[in-house]
Image (spheres, rainbow, N blue to C red):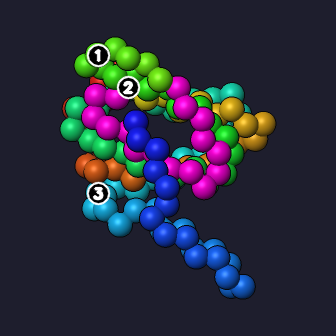
Amino acid sequence: MQKLDPEYVRIDKRGQLIQISSGVWKQINYLNIKKDKSFGGHYHKHKRELFYVIDGFISVTIVNMKNKQATKMYFGGNKCFIIEPYEKHTIYNEAEKDSRLIELLSKPYSKEDTYE
């Protein structure tokens, strides 16, 4: 897993613009994770996933399926991270309210590339 900073941030009297990524992505998803619930628990062999936390507070548990090394990181609003192939990932909502995220996929979802 790789922590990312937004590529560009502009804040002025009109509001705020946050450029998350200028990469090539094939699918974009909006996630709303309820309090005490999780998404994931799987990995992909051929897909990268970029997550942007709009608001809330989450923990991300990663298990590298090649060497079985596990890590856990925490992210609040306006934070980004990338899940690489072979990283089993579980995103858990640690907040007292729903956590909202945007997910960008390097390839569209397919059951054939989703492994428990």
Q: In terms of secondary structure, where does tag 3 sit?
A: loop
Q: CA distance from mark 2 to mark 3?
A: 20 Å
Q: Which residue is mark 1?
A: 67
Q: CA distance from mark 2 to mark 1?
A: 12 Å
Q: Which quadrant would residue 9 be assigned to in this image?
A: bottom right
The one nearer the camera, 71 or 85, is 71
Q: In the rendered image of this protein, does residue 70 appear above or below residue 92? A: above
- Main secondary structure found in the magenta portion: strand
Characterize the local packing of mark 1: few (<14), some (14-19) or many (20 or more) Cα atoms within 10 angstroms. few
Residue 10 magenta? no
Q: Which residues are magenta?
A: 72-87
Percent of width and height locating residue 90: 49, 28
**Extreme residue in the bottom direction:** 13
Q: Is residue 74 magenta?
A: yes
- Within 10 angstroms of label 3, few (less than 14), some, or many (20 or more) residues? few
Outermost right residue:
96
Query: Which of the two discs, 2 and 3, sits closer to the camera?
Result: 2
Q: Residue at x 34, y 22 (%)?
A: 64
Write the residue at 25% across / 19% down.
66
CB of mark 2 within 8 Å of CB of mark 3? no
Q: Quadrant of residue 86?
A: top left
Earlier along the polypeptide chain: callout 2 or callout 1? 1
Question: Three-letter amino acid code at disc 2?
Answer: Lys
Q: Is residue 89 left or right of residue 72?
A: left
Mark with earlier residue (2, 3) = 3
